Structures are given as C-alpha cells and as structure tokens.
Amino acid sequence: MSAEATFAVSGQHYLFNVQTFAHVVLALGGDAYRYALRDRTTQDVIDDVAAGTSQLGVLFQTSDTADELNTVFEAAGLEFVELIASAPRVALPASHPMVNAESLTLEDMEDYPYVYFDQGKDAPAAFAEEALAGVPRAKSIACTDRASLSELIVALNGYTVTSGILVGISDGASLKTVPLDTDVTLHLGYVVRKGEELDETARRFVDTLEKNLAKYARF
C-alpha cells in the first residue's frame, strides 16, 4: 500500500463501488483516516493492484472476455475473485422512447447514440467496461468519467450497456435499465495480488460489496 492511503480501492466506473466504499468509511468512523477510491480504466485498475497502490480492484468480465482477461491477470500476478453473475442491461433516460420495453436488442438501439468509457489508445477489446462493446455502432461517444456518461445519455437520448446496478448516487437517478436480449453473462468481482490476504478493512469492503451486489443485481 502507498504511504498516501491506509486503504485504497481502484475500480471501473461503478456506482456500487462508491456506495460500498462510503458504507465502509461510515462503519469504521474514526477521528482521522486516509483512504482512497480511484475510478480507473481497466488497465489502470490492474496496474494499481499489481503495484500495491490499491489493495484490490473491482472489475467485471463477461463470458466472452473471461479467458483473455484471466490471462492478463495471471501475467500481472493477480487473481480474479467472482462475487456475482448477472445479465447485461441497457441503461437509458427515463424519458427514452424504448424505456418501457420488456427487453431490447442492440439492433433496437442502432438509431441512438452509444456512450461508453474510453479505455485509452490500443486497449484490448476485452478491457471495455460494457458487454458487447465490440459490436459496431453508427453513433458512439467515448468519455472518461461517470458523471459525463450519465449526462450525455440523458442529454442525447442515448444509451450504454451496464450491469444495471445503479444505486446510491444521484448521477444514476435519471437512468433506467431494460434487459438486453443476449446470451452473454456478466461476472462481477475483484482482483487481488496472488497469495495476498485481505486485511480487515478490505475484507469489510468485499463483504459489503457482495451484499450490495446480491441486493441490487438485476437478471
């Protein structure tokens, strides 16, 4: 761990990361502490945990990307611990014409802007934070932070593909999710350095994260 933080988590741009981290900070209390929560690209999450800058990194893989990602984790000296599997969902504004659909295909959404998280130049397709990210889109917008993604989706009547777990933070309140018609499965979990046991604070974070995922995951 770095000298700057006694507990640090890196993760992809999930709302449930923030909620879980806040729960842990509130539960631990204390008159003084130095923690860190880092929203990162997939490569940066891997790098943070491999270097010990963060004790764990919250990531997802899909049934399509698991083999490639596990090879990357292995090369970095990390292991992936799955907490829950869930189904991908389309996130779109509450006012969107497709919001009341029972389910959606990517073909249904082809006329609307697709908004996604930029993973950086030359990042492997498997590093995407959205399932089925490799499917070509006529309209697509890359962004680098969660608030911008949510604002763009609402402002442009756009969409993204997500876990559907939009909880606890105001920038997810204006989005709704609809099941995506696909055989792809999401596997949500975390990476840690091989052979490294989590300390009490990290263990509390993982336990809280697992409970939140089980409570809010949509299938």
Image (cartoon, rainbow, N blue to C red):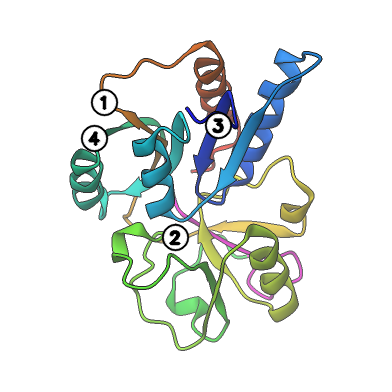
Label drawn at residue 8: 3
Query: Which amino acid, by three-letter code, is at mark 1?
Result: Lys
Which segment is the magenta one? Answer: 85-100
Residue 186 visible (yes or no)? no
Single out the mark in the foreground, 2 or 1.
1
Q: Residues within 10 Å of mark 3 (few under 14, many from 20)?
A: many
List x then y, in percent, for residue 122: 31, 72
Which residue is painted at 50% across and 31% down in the image?
Answer: 2
Check if mark 2's residue and mark 1's residue have beta carbons within 8 Å. Answer: no
List x then y, in percent, for residue 55: 45, 28
Say which quarter of the image contains residue 143. Answer: bottom right
Which residue position holds label 1? 194
Query: Which amino acid, by three-letter code, is at mark 2?
Result: Glu
Closer-to-camera residue (104/138): 138
Single out the mark in the foreground, 3 or 2.
3
Q: Residues within 10 Å of mark 2 (few under 14, many from 20)?
A: many
Which residue position holds label 2? 130
Between discs 4 and 1, the one toward the N terminus? 4
Which residue position holds label 4? 77
Q: Label 4 vs label 1: CA separation?
A: 6 Å
Residue 9 visible (yes or no)? yes
